[in-house]
Image (cartoon, rainbow, N blue to C red):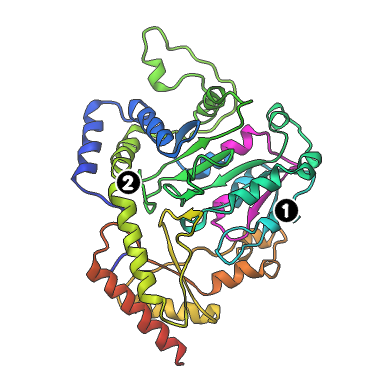
């Protein structure tokens, strides 16, 4: 069976983790701090903090900005549940909006959804393909939105508009108008989960790009404290002689990154541009070449004059099929010893969101994109013979189901 997205584990990873274990320092420490700086340099952000997940980063940023009951946060209906869940955790009102043809959130839908209660907009770079940042920023910086905005905290007063908090979990290495994703929004949250392009097994980070009126070092210190139970000193700081005493200044969380995870990340970041991205691009372009001649295939957007994907997901759509037919195609592909997936079930399809009043009929583009979508294997060790097997399995399966 060809797997869907196994992590790349080789001797470099093993040696890096072994060296960290032998060092005696395995929780947040020097490797995590080095990883933060290298990520920061790579994406061109103003400050970066590493955490145990992108999800934790999204929630920490909402809480830092003071988002809570009575506030609204705009999220695309077509995303993974984590994007919506963090809004609900904060007690805010979740506002779902529809997608556009490229899977990403519609800027016009965002514009229509903004009210005086909107405190944050959370776009998702789905599959690694950047959202329309220029259009979204123009909306948030418009006179209309600024005049509507009601600040309830000093951070909100200083920004003067809703926070642009990007769920860029898929998009590490992607580019928009010559800028790396991670350097555009007020904050981007990346994921380093096991199936991501750059994996630390579990992990994530926040990349900060707030206006110059903010002290990024101060925001970093706050997030560091908030990610460690509200404790003013981490384990590394407490190793200094006589430096044991600390304070708890917030009822914080426990979501810091470990040096074991950072050791994996440092290896993967070192070879990201030279090995990982070129290989993933090669795989996607081969899929494009194989499928584009078929009338039933809608190949996903990968690159244009303003956008370059991180090549995270190859989100193939089968034209004109029902959800039931798509599921039959997936079953046929699995029967041919190839693992595929679906990204994602839009949030209104889930019980947790239906019970809060969301209806899939209100998001027709998101549903249309979803009902024919099949994500194909894309990973470094997928060799040409394996990819040929994937392509043949997809073609044979689609044609078999369409003949029924």
Q: Secondary structure at mark 2?
A: helix
Label 1 near label 2: C-beta < 8 Å?
no
- Whether 317 is drawn above or below 69: the answer is below
Q: Is residue 258 left or right of residue 183?
A: left
Q: Is residue 215 left or right of residue 94?
A: left
Q: Residues within 10 Å of mark 2 (few under 14, many from 20)?
A: some
Residue 164's spot in the image, x, y percent?
62, 42
* Residue farthest to the bottom, as pictured: 404
Q: Earlier in the sequence, mark 2 or mark 1?
A: 1
Residue 400's spot in the image, x, y percent?
40, 88
Residue 258's spot in the image, x, y percent?
37, 33
Name the disc covering residue 272, or none: 2
Question: Residue 196 versus residue 136: which sits nearer the camera?
Answer: 136
Q: Is residue 70 magenta?
A: yes
Viewport quadrant of the N terminus: bottom left
CA separation in Å, label 2 and label 1:
36 Å
Name the disc covering residue 273, or none: none
Question: Residue 89 versus residue 67: which sits nearer the camera?
Answer: 67
Q: Residue at x 27, y 63 (%)?
A: 382
The residue identified by callout 1 is 111
- Whether 270 is drawn above or below 319: the answer is above
The image quadrant of residue 60 is top right
Which residues, given as a range, are shown in magenta? Answer: 60-83
The image quadrant of residue 142 is top right
Q: Is residue 300 magenta?
A: no
Q: Secondary structure at mark 1?
A: helix
Residue 92 appears in the picture as rendered: no
* Residue farthest to the front, as pictured: 305
Residue 45's spot in the image, x, y percent?
49, 35
Q: Residue at x 39, y 70 (%)?
A: 288
């Amino acid at each position: 069976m060809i797997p869907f997205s196994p992590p790349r584990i080789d001797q470099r990873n093993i040696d890096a983790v072994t060296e960290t274990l032998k060092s005696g320092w395995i929780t947040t420490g020097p490797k995590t701090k080095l990883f933060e700086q290298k990520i920061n340099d790579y994406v061109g952000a103003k400050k970066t903090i590493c955490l145990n997940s992108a999800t934790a980063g999204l929630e920490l940023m909402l809480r830092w900005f003071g988002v809570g009951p009575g506030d609204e946060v705009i999220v695309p209906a077509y995303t993974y549940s984590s994007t919506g869940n963090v809004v609900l955790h904060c007690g805010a009102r979740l506002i779902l909006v529809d997608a556009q043809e490229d899977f990403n959130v519609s800027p016009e839908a965002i514009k229509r959804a903004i009210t005086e209660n909107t405190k944050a907009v959370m776009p998702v770079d789905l599959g690694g393909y950047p959202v329309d940042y220029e259009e979204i920023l123009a909306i948030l910086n418009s006179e209309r939105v600024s005049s509507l905005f009601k600040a309830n905290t000093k951070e909100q007063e200083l920004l003067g508009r809703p926070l642009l908090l990007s769920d860029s979990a898929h998009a590490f290495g992607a580019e928009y108008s010559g800028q790396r994703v991670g350097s555009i929004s007020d904050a981007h949250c990346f994921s380093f989960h096991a199936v991501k392009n750059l994996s630390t097994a579990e992990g994530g980070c926040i990349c900060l790009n707030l206006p110059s009126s903010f002290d990024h070092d101060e925001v970093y210190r706050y997030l560091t404290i908030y990610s460690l139970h509200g404790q003013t000193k981490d384990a590394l700081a407490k190793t200094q002689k006589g430096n044991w005493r600390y304070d708890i200044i917030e009822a914080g969380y426990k979501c810091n990154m470990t040096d074991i995870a950072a050791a994996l990340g440092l290896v993967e970041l070192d070879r990201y541009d030279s090995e990982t991205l070129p290989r993933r691009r090669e795989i996607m372009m081969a899929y494009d070449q194989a499928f584009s001649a078929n009338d039933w295939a809608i190949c996903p957007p990968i690159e244009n004059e303003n956008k370059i994907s991180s090549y995270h997901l190859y989100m193939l759509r089968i034209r004109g099929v029902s959800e039931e037919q798509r599921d039959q195609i997936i079953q046929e592909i699995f029967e041919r010893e190839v693992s595929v997936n679906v990204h994602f079930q839009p949030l209104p399809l889930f019980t947790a969101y239906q019970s809060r009043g969301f209806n899939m009929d209100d998001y027709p583009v998101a549903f249309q994109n979803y009902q024919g979508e099949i994500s194909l294997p894309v990973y470094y060790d997928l060799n040409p013979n394996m990819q040929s097997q994937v392509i043949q399995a997809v073609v044979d399966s689609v044609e078999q189901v369409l003949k029924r």
